[in-house]
Image: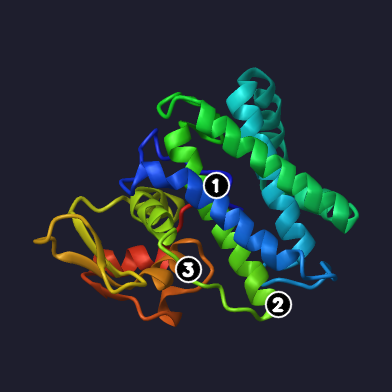
Amino acid sequence: MAHMLNYNLAVPDADDAGALPALVAEGDELDALVRTVDDWSVPTPAPGWTIAHQIAHLAWADANALSALRTPDAFGAELGRAEAEGGGYADEAAAAGAAKPRPVLLDEWRAGRAELAAALRDTPWDHAFPWYMSEVTPALMTPLRLMETWAHGQDVFDAVGVTHRPTDRLRHVASLGVLGRALSFAAAGLPEPADPFRVELTALDGRTWAWGPETAAQRVRGDAVDFCLCVTRRRPWSGTGMTATGEDARKWLEVARVFL
């Protein structure tokens, strides 16, 4: 799941001022979809997870983010449980939430994400607070919550056979994907390449979103949606139109991720 990551207080270079309204809009779009789905027991691409599991996970992660921001000492107990329970930690929380009646879970998710958005809005953008394996700030947590809402939302859209309409909000997800290159190599047990990378992505309106020096030999190109699907591990890069120039660039796309 997408709650354990370490960006060492780095901040994505996308438009920070637009990250919070983008987070709210992403949640609203997923809400508009799931409120039309009566049966939340439909399986999603995540093994063992239904639509209810996906919404329960988002509600739980929002609650944890709010706890970390407002009561960091109390959040320490949650960190202890995560360390003790290991890989099944997020699955158990999702299962517990999914067992709740659909209207209850929907109301909890709505209230929680609204409260988190308000808390992020009212907190200095550079205020550091604890998170899993790291510290974060509202400037980083906001796109992180956007990324996770989009990624788990993609699972729900796939489950019900509805196209997930791309928007400019993906710039924030893509920026995290670029920022997470070191995490990708570390998670695969590989050293991070020393050479610079160039990433060029085609946005919905035809513009190019670019990161890194133009002269870099290691290059990644493709559609912004494909890149976001790749780094959130919703699609293998071989199943997208992404291209990589250079051995390190190809390896990055093979192991790319924005979470552990």
Upstream in the sequence, badge 2 or badge 3?
2
Indicate which label's residue lies in the foreground, 2 or 3: 2
Upstream in the sequence, badge 1 or badge 2?
1
The residue to which callout 2 is attached is 160
Q: Is residue 260 visible?
A: no
Residue at 21% across / 67% down in the picture?
219
Upstream in the sequence, badge 3 or badge 1?
1
Which one is nearer the viewer's eye here, 113 or 12? 113
Q: Quadrant of residue 4?
A: top right
Is residue 121 rendered to the left or right of residue 70? left
* 203 lies above or below 6: below
Which one is nearer the viewer's eye here, 187 or 73? 73
The residue to which callout 3 is attached is 229
* 84 lies above or below 223: above
Q: Amino acid at mark 2?
A: Val
Q: CA distance from mark 3 to mark 1?
A: 16 Å
Q: Amino acid at mark 1?
A: Arg
Q: CA distance from mark 2 to mark 3?
A: 18 Å
The residue to which callout 1 is attached is 145
